[in-house]
Image: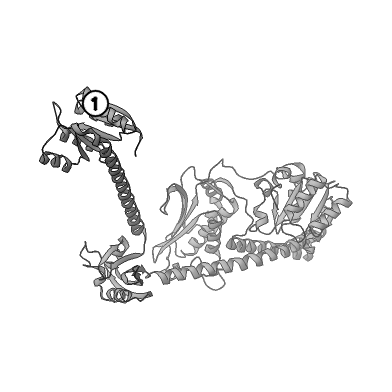
Amino acid sequence: MTSGRLRVLLIEDSEEDALLVLRELRAGGYEPVVRRVETLSEARQALETEDRDVVLSDYELPAFGASEALAVVREHDSDVPFIIISEPIGEEAAVTALQAGADDLVVRGNLARLVPALERALRAGASRREQREETRALSERDELLRALLDASPTAIVMVDHEGRPRIRNRAANALLGSPEDGSARDAPELPAFRRIIERALNGESIHNQRLGREVDSGAIELEVSAAPIRAPSSAVAGAVVIAIDVSHRPELEEQRRQAQKMETVGRLAGGVAHDFNNILTAISGYADFLLDDLPEEGTLRSDAAEIRLAADRGTTLTRQLLALSRKQVVDPEHLDLGEVIVGVERMLRRIVGEDLAFEVDVAPDLPVYADRGQLEQVLMNLVLNARDAMPGGGTVSIRGARVQDPFGGDGAWVLLEVADTGSGMPPAVLDRVLEPFFTTKEAGRGTGLGLSIVHGIVAEAGGRIRVESDLGKGTRVRIYLPLGEGPHGSGAAPSASAEGGAGRSATILVVEDDEAIRTVTARALRNAGFTVLEAQDGEAALRRADEAGGAVDLVLLDVIMPRGNGPGTARALREKHGITRTLFMSGYSDDALARQLDAEVRRNLIAKPFGQRELIARIDEVLTGSTANHAEDSLGGTE
């Protein structure tokens, strides 16, 4: 800095001497902004209110000297240049002042030295600030590096060229022993670990070598890797070694294989169930036709009724498979878990029977966002399992409560707990209870889908499940569901009577690529009095609507079809012909198109398989407006 504005704190009791200093600074090309003080308290105040580029101080003032002034300045700013202006003093006194921390000393009779001394001091002050900033940055970097190293679960040790540890993190102390707690004087002194370090110092890289290690909790197995650290000269300057506790890796691998098995079985179950739903829809429809046409008495009607019952049982099985694969058509809503439990309590008591005690303890206000039917199915499966575990009697208990996050996070969850006092399970069985088709029941008594289905439903709702069991003491299943928000309600939409005939003069366009379903559905609608147009895909649907001049009151269409999917076809029909009343059909919803359906539109979705009475009732709801249908607003974003 050779010129320009200069902020000066001048500690001087003589106004005449101050003017001489000011004149010299101006002669050197500076524009000094000077604040003159005469006491130490004034100096402190000046330093606190404004930063200064330099402090110039008289060597000796009436109440104090330059050494006291220097101490005050250094308390506030250790880097600001400090120059003493003095009458001639001895060499020893001058050396003492400089050793105390002053940047320079200028004799008042030779003020021509002031500007050169000032410029040297300014450069020195800037250098001190840079060094201090560099030191601070290095310290922060070291602290950050230490924090990162200590946060790692991997043991990390860096040694110098003689094998002496220079860096070791917290995990290294835990896995290899800490010098502080006496478990090991030095990690490299573990014999096997020492040999790995020596190999790395000889230039060798070691990958994933297994080592055994005894710790307080027992034996552990480490996987160790090491590599040499080379200096710019390519000489080995040290080595870095990492170690990972792999004692639980077989258990994790088993969990991964189990998860893959669950996913594979789920995909298979979902695909089979989806195709089977189409078959059941046709079977149910034709059985209903027979029941409508056959007289009340006679074996043929009885046979038709048995076919219908068998189809219903098949429907239950496919819904179990879809729940297992998490592809079931669900209608989540805001519910109170306590209300759901109370709603099925009477049925559950009948399932348990009179020979077992049945206890229910439900706290108020347990909001969840889930499918009511699925929650009821979870309760049913868990209570059935509890009952079967107590052939000699016992107690089944159901509890609902709010709990703090049991998984280490913040917030609250809703807990559903079903417990029994039965025989319990050994660890080998407990590890497999969530596997599909795994059962402890006698051959022919269980499908092995109960807890697997519960697991699928809970996962679909964003929850988690824990199963605990002790031999001879019983089993406890805890289900944690996310705390729901919003108003609670029954979620039951008003349904139009299938016998009412509301809007039965309407024209309905049925769009379905499965010929059997399309045929049986069209026949059921015609039997109910509707005019029916049929199309096997989206492109054909647009042609049929064109032929009808757009005179279609409602379109009933599958979500997934070739040559035009359901949402895209519905949007095209709305844009071209103004057809806004839509009812979708689907066997499951775990595909990209079904997920794009707006929540309002999803309420107008009927799950396959369905009976003709259920279908007619849903058609009447949409036609009469009993169920809100806002296709104009809801289908715009689907592709």
Identify the residue at horizontal 68%, vertical 61% (top origin): 312
Identify the residue at horizontal 41%, vertical 70% (top origin): 249
With 309 as the anchor, is 6 left or right in this view? left
Task: Describe the colour scheme in one phrase.
Answer: one colour
Identify the residue at horizontal 55%, vertical 74% (top origin): 443
Q: Reply above or below: 123 against 610.
A: above
- Residue 58 pos. (x, y %): 18, 31
> Residue at label 1?
18
Q: Quadrant of residue 425?
A: bottom left
Q: Reply above or below: 566 against 58.
A: below
Q: Reply above or below: 453 against 344.
A: below
Q: How many numbered marks appear?
A: 1
Front residue of 232/397: it is 232
- Residue 143 pos. (x, y %): 32, 53
Front residue of 236/283: it is 236
With 93 as the anchor, is 572 left or right in this view? right
> Which quadrant, please, contains the N terminus?
top left
- Find numbered disc 1 in the image and state the secondary structure of the residue it sits on: helix
Q: Reply above or below: 54 against 241.
A: above
Residue 443 visible from this viewpoint: yes
- Residue 190 pos. (x, y %): 25, 73
Q: Residues within 10 Å of mark 1 (few under 14, many from 20)?
A: some
With 297 as the anchor, is 346 left or right in this view? left
Residue 426 visible from this viewpoint: no
With 74 as the anchor, is 635 left or right in this view? right
Residue type at the position of mark 1: Ala
Front residue of 427/298: it is 427
Residue that lies at the very extreme toward the top in this rendered image: 15
- Residue 246 pos. (x, y %): 38, 70
